[in-house]
Image: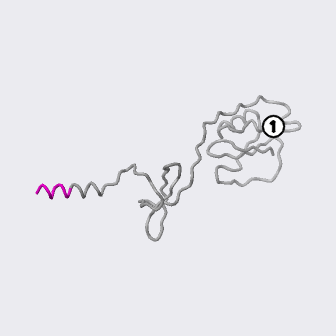
């Protein structure tokens, strides 16, 4: 009886997978589309040959803590002859929310042209009082006047 109990206990414990197990490419997963970050890579659960497995993974860049840029004071030159690229570059390294707030404080028109891998439709008209920004992981990485 004791041997049977030990055998049942051993089999049941072997069947339990730890919830925090390290993910590796080709390993089993339970839900298609689920993502996990492990060992500096982001793995996605995909269907392969009728099975759900983790893909090869994509390296994840660590984002260093970025000090928010400083919003420049208002300047009449922003409207005549227009915002200069040098002034617009003050939005670089700001969070998207801070950059938008700064642009509003300066009475600049503000739009997001790209957020991470998503591109937004933009008009082709050039406006001297408008900036178009690219946002990656919540931080402004590019600024264009117009």
**SS type, badge 1:** helix
Q: Is residue 107 left or right of residue 97?
A: right
Residue at point 14%, 57% (across, down): 3
Is residue 97 positioned above or below 17 on the image?
above
Q: Is residue 67 left or right of residue 56?
A: right
Q: Which segment is the magenta one?
A: 1-8
Percent coordinates x, y for residue 12 in the rendering: 25, 56
- Indicate whether residue 47 is drawn in magenta: no
Percent coordinates x, y for residue 144 in the rendering: 78, 45
Q: Residue furthest front?
A: 3
Q: Residue furthest left?
A: 1
| Prevalent SS, magenta region | helix
Q: Is residue 52 left or right of residue 10?
A: right
Is residue 128 positioned above or below 5 on the image?
above
Which quadrant of the figure has residue 9? bottom left
Percent coordinates x, y for residue 145 in the rendering: 80, 44
**How many marks on residues?**
1
Residue at point 53%, 52% (across, down): 41
| 10 Å crowding of disc 1: few (<14), some (14-19), many (20+) | few
Which quadrant of the figure has residue 106? top right
Q: Is residue 56 left or right of residue 101?
A: left
Color theme of the render: one colour
Image quarter where the N terminus lies is bottom left
Is residue 129 positioned above or below 41 on the image?
above
Q: Residue furthest right?
A: 81
Q: Residue furthest bottom?
A: 49
Residue at point 61%, 45% (across, down): 137
Q: Between residue 112 and residue 94, name the one nearer to us.
A: 94
Percent coordinates x, y for residue 105 in the rendering: 73, 32
Residue annotated with mark 1 = 86
């Amino acid at each position: 009886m004791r041997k049977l109990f030990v055998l049942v206990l051993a089999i049941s414990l072997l069947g339990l997978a730890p919830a925090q197990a390290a993910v590796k490419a080709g390993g089993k997963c339970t839900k298609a589309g689920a993502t996990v970050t492990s060992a500096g890579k982001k793995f996605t659960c995909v269907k392969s040959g009728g099975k759900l497995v983790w893909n090869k993974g994509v390296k994840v860049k660590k984002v260093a803590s970025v000090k928010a840029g400083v919003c420049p004071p208002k300047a009449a030159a922003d409207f005549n002859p227009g915002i200069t690229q040098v002034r617009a570059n003050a939005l670089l390294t700001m969070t998207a929310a801070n950059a938008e707030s700064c642009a509003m404080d300066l009475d600049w028109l503000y739009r997001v042209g790209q957020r991470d891998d998503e591109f937004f439709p933009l008009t082709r008209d050039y406006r001297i009082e408008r900036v178009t920004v690219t946002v990656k992981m919540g931080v402004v990485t590019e600024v264009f006047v117009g």
